[in-house]
Image (spheres, rainbow, N blue to C red):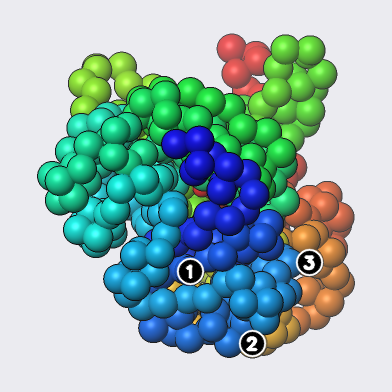
Amino acid sequence: MERLVRLTRDGHLRLVVVGLGYVGLPTATLFADAGFNVVGVDIKPEIVNAVNKGVSPINEPGLNELVLRNVRAGRLRAAAELGEALREAGAVLVSVQTPVDEGRRPDLSFLERALRDVGVGLRRGVLVVVCSTVPPGTMLGFVKPLLESLSGLRVEDDFFLAYAPERIAPGRALKEFVENPRLVGGVGPKSTRLAAELFRAVCREVIETNAPVAEVAKLAENAFRDVNIAFANLLALICEQYGVDVWEVIRLANTHPRVSIHTPGAGVGGPCLTKDPYLLIHKFEFKHNLIKVAREVNDYMPEHVVKLVTQALKKVGKEVRGSKVAVLGTAYKADVDDPRESPAKPIIEGLIKLGARVAAYDPYCKESFGAERAETMREALRRADCVVVVTGHTVFKKLDLQELKELMGDNPIIVDGRRVVNASKAEKLGFTYYGIGLGRLGERKLGYLRS
Ligand code: SAJ
């Protein structure tokens, strides 16, 4: 044990990272950059080939340079199979996806597959760390017995096992990996100590706990954020009904020292917030399940955007069927290229289903979810009846309304899912403007005050 701690501290431990996705590749690369010899394993040959050429297959600021530097220095390489790398490894970090299935139940098949490979080749003294987000009870109830039965070894006596959930947001992954405190929960004290030592090599702060607590804490973070966004979205719907601007309401409410309301929008996307709340509650039976309702509120927002488009077109005497709708943004959040679980998908599909001709433009993301993909913003906007802002990319905050007006068709409409457009300026220029949390600008519905 002490020898392992020393090896870890000195960066002499050989590492294997299983899964080279949005989390695994930054993990492998940052450990390589800290001086460890790292082999990243992925079942996708295109990922393995790219990494071995020194190229990052994902678009994460700073990652490409870091991959190239460490591949060139011989500290980082990728492999399609675990076999040989595992024989030399002192620690294995598992970072594969843990999605939910159609019934929103955890799908641990990717994790199981990775762990089976690890389990059959596991040697004495090796540290296994699960970084994937997992449902409560997974480490003790699933991972530990699986590895013990496949290897014939006993945890804490023969090998070490810990849970160290990732907490990095795409777009800021490298910085957050280093700067965000890392939770490390072993299945026993030796495992916790060894895993904490390993992460101290890269992370500024490591917080030691146990695996069951770390499992729930990780899920609590994302469920907390999802519930908060749902509150903001619900408030937006309430404000639309009363004809007041939710942004103004939030700005004022947030001047209270104990209030900090999140930002409402066209929907909540990404691979984490859309499923982690379900991982947290999948075995929790409770009639008043706030976390589940919050998910439903957030999932409703794309449908609401489609309703606003329909309403706006009707207002100017047009039908959705046959109208051209330009969707700005297919990435799941601002300034990233990642389309996973993006609210743009249900919005585009909903509009197509109603017969709209949909053109999608995103400066970073290639996905168009069945819409016609426009290469330029001008192409998307040309003779469009309605433009819908779905993703809050910084470039969309600088839309030239005059140019928009010239490009679009008669009676142009803006449906602003991220409130990036100056509403009164748009109305002055002759747009019909609808915004999330505002509804139709100028349409004040304060009748309730008189009743
Ligand atoms: N969103 C809103 N309103 C807001 C904030 C976000 O509508 O006020 C939307 C975004 O547009 C996006 C979605 O929510 O569609 C999710 O974006 P996000 O920035 O909240 O989170 P992710 O999914 O990129 O990353 C989250 C982060 N978790 C927390 O902030 C608690 C990140 O730290 C985690 O590492 C990541 O999940 C993960 O992998 O679990």
Disc 1, disc 3: CB below 8 Å?
no
The first of marks 2 and 3 along the sequence is 2
Number of marks in picture:
3
The first of marks 1 and 3 along the sequence is 1
| Residue found 40% across the figure and 37% down from its top | 162
Farthest-out residue, front = 3
| Residue found 54% across the figure and 35% down from its top | 196
Specify whether 263 is left or right of 280.
right
Residue wearing tag 2 = 375
Question: Mark 1 belongs to which amino acid?
Answer: Val
Disc 2, disc 1: CB below 8 Å?
no
In the image, is residue 24 above or below residue 134? below
| Figure quadrant of residue 233 | top right
Q: Whereabouts is ligand 1, in terms of quadrant?
A: top right
Residue wearing tag 3 = 395
Residue at mark 1 to residue at mark 3: CA–CA distance:
38 Å
| Residue found 54% across the figure and 83% down from its top | 52
| Figure quadrant of residue 42 | bottom left
Disc 2, disc 3: CB below 8 Å?
no
Specify whether 370 is left or right of 120.
right
Residue 198: horizontal and vertical position, in percent?
A: 56, 43
Could you tell me which secondary element the residue under label 2 belongs to? loop
Residue at mark 2 to residue at mark 1: CA–CA distance:
38 Å
Which mark, residue 39?
1
Could you tell me which secondary element the residue under label 3 belongs to? helix
Residue 116: horizontal and vertical position, in percent?
A: 21, 57
Specify whether 211 is left or right of 67.
left
Question: Mark 2 belongs to which amino acid?
Answer: Glu
Could you tell me which secondary element the residue under label 1 belongs to? strand
Question: Mark 3 belongs to which amino acid?
Answer: Val
